[in-house]
Image (spheres, rainbow, N blue to C red):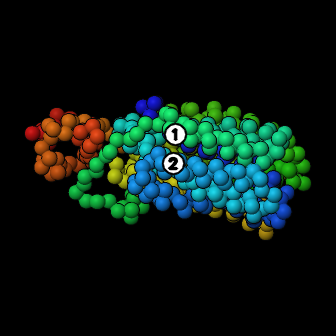
Amino acid sequence: MLKKVLPLSGILSLRFLGLFLVLPVLSVYAMTLNGATPLLVGIIVGGYALTQAIFQVPFGSMSDKIGRKPTILVGLIIFLIGSVISAVSTDIYTLMLGRFLQGAGAIGSVITAMISDLVEEEVRGKAMAMMGGTIALSFALAMGLGPVIGAHFGVETLFWITAVLAVLAMILLFTKVPTPPKIKHIYHNKTKTADILKDPNLLSMIIINGMQKGLMTMAFVIIPIILTSDAFSWEKADLWMAYVPAMILGLVAMGPAAVFGEKHNKPKQIFLISIVLFIASFLLMGLTSSSVLFVVGVVSFFIAFNMMEPLVQSMISKFAKVHQKGAALGIANSFAYFMTFVGGTTAGVFLDFSNREVLGLSAAGIALLWLLWTLKLQNPTKHSHLYVPQEHVDMDKLHALEHEHIAEWYINETEHLVIVKYVSEHLSKEEIEGKILK
């Protein structure tokens, strides 16, 4: 599994590392450009996510027609061009164009779908958790490096580093990523997109994914601007003192959260704890007059984000049926990117027309509603998988297979296998074989 997942996770992580590197200092840097206002700065911080949301579905459709690898390459080239434009920009609108282009290379769902193609069903949750963990690691690493590099070499240098990371991702794509098998899904009733939204657990996960990303960009608009404002009068070179401890403690929290959520099947509890930390972080960042307490709020935010990130994609993958996974992940990621844009823009509006106190209280209030909604989430049912060579299966019996403890079945045409997903506590593999074998 590692040989299949790590290269793809590496590509996604390199891309996110580039996007995250500028986040700790982007808002305060953008405010120095010609034509800048807090609203436009908020749009720039979350702008990449708007084009991500728009192009998720087109890139997914493209990957079905021309293949996953060529689609990922196109996305990385667009990301590279956007990074270069951002690096050479001298006014707010050119930077905005660069950020929009960075997001237009929307390959996240394509990579997630490719991981689903390559990895067996029973370990797919672990694969998604590994992918989420590498993204969280990129996030934490960027928080430590971004402020330091930006302060010493300029924020434009961070965009040039991002361009180099895009090239490295292209090299990784064609040297380490395998070609996925062809999967055929056969069902009595075809699932519609509306069915995904009607599933309460999938809907809750879509909301969790969106809220987490929306609050992230909201935080990255206000943290550097407030710390360098008259409220605290920090220098840009001092921002690392807030981000580095947050990065370290976020990494420390990520491991136990992933183990507790995945191994012990308690993701709901992790999500609830994280949301409580989000509420506390925005209350502190919005209301405190102490720089120490403000940094405590920053640390709380990072811990909450890193506890969630390894679990989100995994849980969506677990709650969705095989033929829903692509659509469910596409919807979840599109909504997350849209909320990323909304979060940054909303923070910009508040700072332009109101103040950080109102913003902090508003964000905490929204997170409280989010907490109440998440109480409805259920931890996923544990399933087992039966693999049977296709030549041994009576296809008429397979098509007629119905049982309350059989979640689904599908065919791996490349390996000529029939896979049945079932609850082993209530049904044995011998019983299933008796229903489908010739």
Point 34% across, 48% down: residue? 322
Q: Which mark is residue 109?
A: none
Say which amino acid is labelled 1.
Leu
For marks 2 and 1, the one nearer the N-term is 2
Residue 412: which quarter of the image? top left
Residue 358 visible at all: no
**Along the line of sight, which residue is nearer the eye, 303 or 184?**
184
Q: Residue furthest bottom?
A: 353
Point 79% across, 69% down: residue? 353
Give the residue pinned by disc 2. 72
Point 63% across, 32% down: residue? 252
**Along the line of sight, which residue is nearer the eye, 386 or 270?**
386
Q: Is residue 436 left or right of residue 66?
A: left
Q: Position of residue 229 (x, y in %)?
A: 87, 54
Q: Residues within 10 Å of mark 2 (few under 14, many from 20)?
A: many
Please report contact status of discs 2 and 1: CB closer than 8 Å, yes or no.
yes
Q: Position of residue 207 (x, y in %)?
A: 52, 57
Q: Is residue 232 left or right of residue 413?
A: right
Say which amino acid is labelled 2.
Ile
Q: Residues within 10 Å of mark 1 (few under 14, many from 20)?
A: some
Task: Give the quadrant of the C terminus.
Answer: top left
Residue 303: which quarter of the image? top right
State the SS at label 2.
Answer: helix
State the SS at label 1.
Answer: helix
Q: Position of residue 204 (x, y in %)?
A: 48, 55
Give the residue pinned by disc 1. 173
